[in-house]
């Protein structure tokens, strides 16, 4: 990634948070709707707020992107364009979509009991979340082609 940025995503944009994680960004989801709580968290953790609430960010020193769209792909594009970010395809699917934790590569033989047999037999690379311990296969073809094509269109 060219620049280390991290996000604080407000509760109406849960899907956007998930997809930012999928493409490798640190995107913390905040279920709180209280404006001060959101602002304090963004300042304390130096996170850019992504929200549809136009009332957030009218103060100096807070970095906010006010999301204008309902469509997920347009939301993603707006965030990347407004901040001049380019996703690094090497980081795709390397963060837990549920916890926002970076995933670590694990040896295939250590996950045999944790993944379905079909997945184990057809995938060679696996990663694990340090927080929830979930194991994910690294789906090379999926991450390199399908989503990326969609994004670039
Ligand atoms: Zn996790």
Image (cartoon, rainbow, N blue to C red):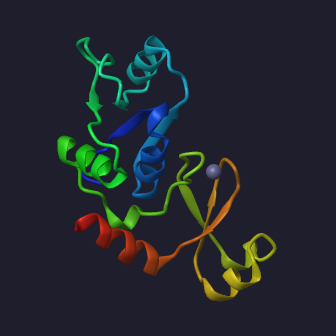
Of the 4 image quadrants, the one containing the C terminus is bottom left
Q: Which picture quadrant has residue 144?
A: bottom left
Residue 12's spot in the image, x, y percent?
Answer: 46, 34
Residue 145's spot in the image, x, y percent?
Answer: 36, 77
Seen in the image, is 97 located left or right of residue 75? right
Residue 59's spot in the image, x, y percent?
Answer: 26, 11
Seen in the image, is 144 located left or right of residue 69? right
Identify whether 59 is placed above or below 12.
Answer: above
45 or 117: nearer the eye? 117
Residue name at image x 27 percent, y 44 percent: 79
Q: Residue furthest right?
A: 113
Q: Residue furthest bottom?
A: 121
Residue 22's spot in the image, x, y percent?
Answer: 45, 57
Identify whether 142 is placed above or below 96.
Answer: below
Residue name at image x 30 percent, y 73 percent: 149
Q: Which picture quadrant has residue 39?
A: top left
Residue name at image x 36 percent, y 51 percent: 72
Q: Which picture quadrant has residue 91?
A: bottom left
12 or 108: nearer the eye? 12
């Amino acid at each position: 990634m060219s620049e280390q940025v991290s996000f604080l995503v407000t509760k109406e944009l849960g899907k956007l948070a998930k997809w930012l994680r999928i493409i490798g960004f640190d995107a913390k989801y905040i279920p709180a709707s209280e404006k001060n709580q959101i602002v304090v968290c963004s300042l304390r953790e130096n996170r850019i707020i992504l929200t549809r609430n136009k009332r957030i960010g009218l103060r100096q020193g807070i970095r906010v992107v006010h999301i204008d769209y309902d469509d997920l792909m347009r939301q993603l594009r707006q965030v990347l364009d407004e901040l001049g970010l380019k996703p690094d395809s090497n980081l795709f699917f390397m963060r837990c979509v549920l916890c926002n934790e970076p995933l670590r590569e694990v040896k295939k033989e250590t996950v045999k009991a944790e993944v379905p047999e079909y997945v184990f037999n057809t995938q060679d690379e696996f990663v694990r979340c340090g927080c929830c311990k979930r194991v994910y296969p690294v789906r090379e073809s999926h991450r390199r082609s399908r989503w990326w094509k969609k994004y670039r269109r």
